[in-house]
Image (spheres, rainbow, N blue to C red):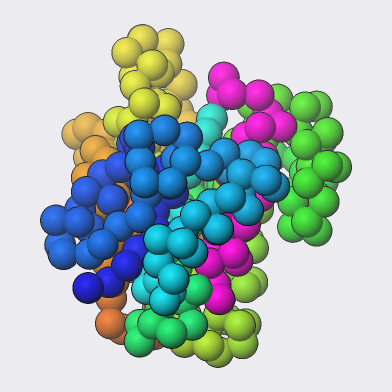
Amino acid sequence: MRIIVVTGAASGIGKATAEYLRSSGARVIGVDLENTDVIADLSTPQGRKEMIESVSSLAPDGIDGVVAAAGVCPPVSPDQIISVNYFGAIATLEGFQPHLANSPAPRAVAVVSTAALMECRDDLVEACLSGDEEAARKIALECGETSYTASKRALGLWLRRAAAETSWAGAGITLNAVAPGTVRTPMTIPLLETEEGREILSKATPIAVKDYGEPEELAEILAFLATTEGRYIIGQILYVDGGTDALLRPNLL
């Protein structure tokens, strides 16, 4: 039985992924602020440490996979968004890296976003990539809502650079990501319920299909990347977005 850690497991895409994995026979250790196996606040260094320690006690012999799905968006404060979406995700992936060492098929997956394709402050992205959380939080307060975009772009760039390193691919650990478009979750439902919100989404994340995605559709893909026996998928960001990426960037491979 594979043991897989899923952050953000109490709601939305994380919850759907945890349920999908359990239904497929995996043992899931869920992490969130409430209503799951491990209670931890990934916006703080202490909360991240507590997550690693708690999972270690529940799975002392190691784990087989990790899905970093925890994330927040406005109206959460911009500095909090950066701390959870970028620094919390990196702490999750890097923190569990040693715990994957004994697995015959270790897999790590992050949740990015099509928002990473939008404009944001380069200095905020660079502050994230340099690991300076204090500076990144300060810049985020200046950026406002575009901090969400920056957090996801930085995460995607980090993943692309890290995945092929000896500590990841060289150690047999596949590191990949899924970039959802608009999906019906507690984060997006308030927007989808208003005409103004739907108009914003139609411009920012156009889709080629008839309706927006459901968490279960993302769960299937995340679960695949977290359980596949294949070792040749490295550093990929799979856009599961109803066609948003293809519509916005038709001339890019």
Which residue is found at the position 40% from the left and 67% from the top?
Answer: 59
Where's the N terminus, which quadrant?
A: bottom left
Which range of residues does the magenta coloring cover?
74-98
Question: Is residue 243 at all visible to an observer of this figure?
Answer: no
Which is the main secondary structure of the residues drawn in magenta? helix
The front one of 243 and 115 is 115
Residue 171, given in percent of the width and then of the height, sits at 53, 88
User: Residue 63 vs residue 74: left or right?
Assistant: left
The front one of 21 and 62 is 62
Q: Is residue 91 magenta?
A: yes
Which residue is found at the position 49% from the left and 55% from the top?
Answer: 54
Which residue is found at the position 67% from the left and 46% from the top?
Answer: 46
Residue 177, given in percent of the width and then of the height, sits at 45, 61
Q: Is residue 94 magenta?
A: yes
In the picture shown, does residue 52 fall above or below 82? below
- Total residue callouts: 0
Residue 84, given in percent of the width and then of the height, sits at 60, 41
Which residue is found at the position 30% from the left and 31% from the top?
Answer: 184
Question: Is residue 44 at all visible to an observer of this figure?
Answer: yes
